[in-house]
Amino acid sequence: MKRDAMVLDTSSPFGTYPPIGLVRTAWRLASQARLPKGLRRYVRLFLGKIFTGPYDLEADGLKFRVYPSDNYDDRKVLIKGRLPEVEEHKLIKPFLSDDAVFVDVGANIGVYTVFAAHHGARVIALEPNAHSVDKLQCNIDANGLQNVTIVPTAAGPRDDVLELYSETSNRGFGTLDKRVTNGEWGGDWAPSTVKMRPLTTIVDEAGVKKIDVLKIDVEGFEDRVLLPFLRHAERSLWPRVILLETNCRPYWSEDCLTELANRSYKVTGRTNDNMVFELTA
């Protein structure tokens, strides 16, 4: 059964919605790994009707307005009281500074964008899901950040219009590859039409002359973002560091890892879901 799109509050001042009472405890219960996957989903759907959100809270000194029934990152910020993917943040932090450029492909609600901008980097944040764009902008505004440009489009090998499939209990989990919606990640997926543009075009229009960190998290479409970019961009625009999600690697059409190695990128970090590459020559 499809759920109606959630109504967001992006205008009330931050702090309007404190996470009071049993909110955190309830969502922690719903996310316990010892619960069977199907039961966890049922509990989340039930709690989503009671503790929908929004809730305003700080994680690692950064402000977020979260809707835990709506998005995995929202739930993690609420439950843990810190940013998701903390190891990945540690790996890229040394490359963020006042003169750095961070390109966030698949920005979602902004846990990377807000983190990078908070550390002084200029951020180009790509997010094609209109629902997530509204949440992203709200979180940018809550932190008073002026160094972020949101690009509400998908990146890919060409100019096109495609279907973006989003899972309605985790709207940040969106893919342009319909195969991802079956099997392990089967669920309540809904399509929406989005624009796709080459990353070379997007960064050129943004006036970007260098990229210090490029993060790509687009659920199995990473190869179709990264490889056309490396093949068509001037070498001077190749990112110094690439944070690449690899947990949907079976859906890649081409192997990014081989081409990155051939282009003098060395693996400098690895987590369960991501790999970090640094340009060495």
Image (cartoon, rainbow, N blue to C red):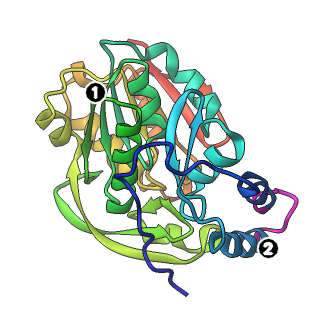
Element class at badge 1? loop
* Residue holding disc 1: 147
Query: Residue visible at 49% across and 49% down?
Result: 16
Residue that label 2 marks: 39
Classify mark 2: residues with Cα within 10 Å, few (<14), some (14-19) or many (20+).
few
In terms of image quadrants, where is residue 279? top left
User: Residue 134, located in which quarter of the rendered image?
Assistant: bottom left
What's the residue at 25%, 52% (across, down)?
152
What is the quadrant of the N terminus in the image? bottom right
Above-or-below relation of 235 to 192 = above
As drawn, which residue projects farthest toward the right?
Answer: 34
Residue 52, compared with residue 146, is above or below; it is: below
The residue located at (37%, 62%) in the rendering is 131
| Pick the front one: 258 or 182 | 182
Identify the element where label 2 is drawn. Answer: helix
Residue sitting at the far bottom: 1
- Name the main secondary structure of what is drawn in magenta: loop
The x and y percentages for residue 58 are: 57, 36
* Magenta highlight range: 30-37
- Percent from the top left, x then y, of residue 67? 54, 58
Instruction: Let me know if residue 267 appears in the view.
Output: no
> Can residue 142 be spotted in the picture?
yes
**Image point (33%, 73%), residue name:** 192
Q: Identify residue type, mark 2.
A: Leu
At label 1, the amino acid type is Asn
Query: Magenta stretch: residue 44 in it?
Result: no
